[in-house]
Amino acid sequence: MSAIGERVARFKISDPKPARCAACFCSADATTRFVDLDAHIDRGAIVEDGSGAVIDSIDELHLCENCVNNAAETLDYKPGLHQTHLRLNRELMRERDELRQENRILRQLVGEQ
């Protein structure tokens, strides 16, 4: 496996979820997914206004799905395009299989095997 392949293989859905996204600082909710990029960072601390109490520190690179999607779109990656291509390919393969089956039946009707 290449060095890039090894690096990407370490990316995974964050479990447990971090308290916040390392990029946009949004808080984790029940539906937001995070990607663990397996990298140590020092984004500093989130402190409470007024008292200066440390609420959270961000030491690991966990990004929310919105930030990952925005980054992908910045690189001209179209998240829905792959799904569309996969769906169309499956439809074409299904039609191909149906046509092959119909062709077998027609060959049997005309006496070819």
Image (tube, helix red, strand yellow):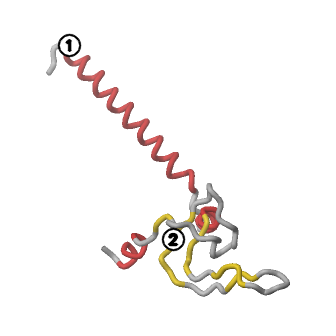
Residue under the image location 48 percent in, 47 percent down: 85
If the image is split into quadrants, where does the C terminus sit? top left
Does 69 sit left or right of 47 as displayed?
left
- The image quadrant that residue 7 belongs to is bottom left
- Quadrant into which the N terminus falls: bottom left
Place of residue 54 in the rendered image (x, y in percent of width and height, measured from the top left) = 71, 84
**What amino acid is found at the position of numbered circle 1 in the picture?**
Val
Q: Nearer the viewer, residue 6 or 32?
A: 32
Residue 69 drawn above or below residue 81: below
Q: Position of residue 52 (x, y in %)?
A: 79, 87
Q: Which residue is mark 1?
A: 110
> Which residue is identified by label 2?
36
Residue at disc 2, secondary structure: strand
- Residue 92 appears at what percent x and percent y? 41, 36
Give the residue at x 45% y 46%.
Answer: 86
Circle 2 residues within 10 Å: few <14, some 14–19, many ≥20: many
Placement of 10 over or under 73, stated as above or below: below
Contact? badges 2 and 1 (CB < 8 Å): no
Asked whether, in this view, residue 100 is left or right of residue 56, the answer is left
- What amino acid is labelled 2 in the image? Asp
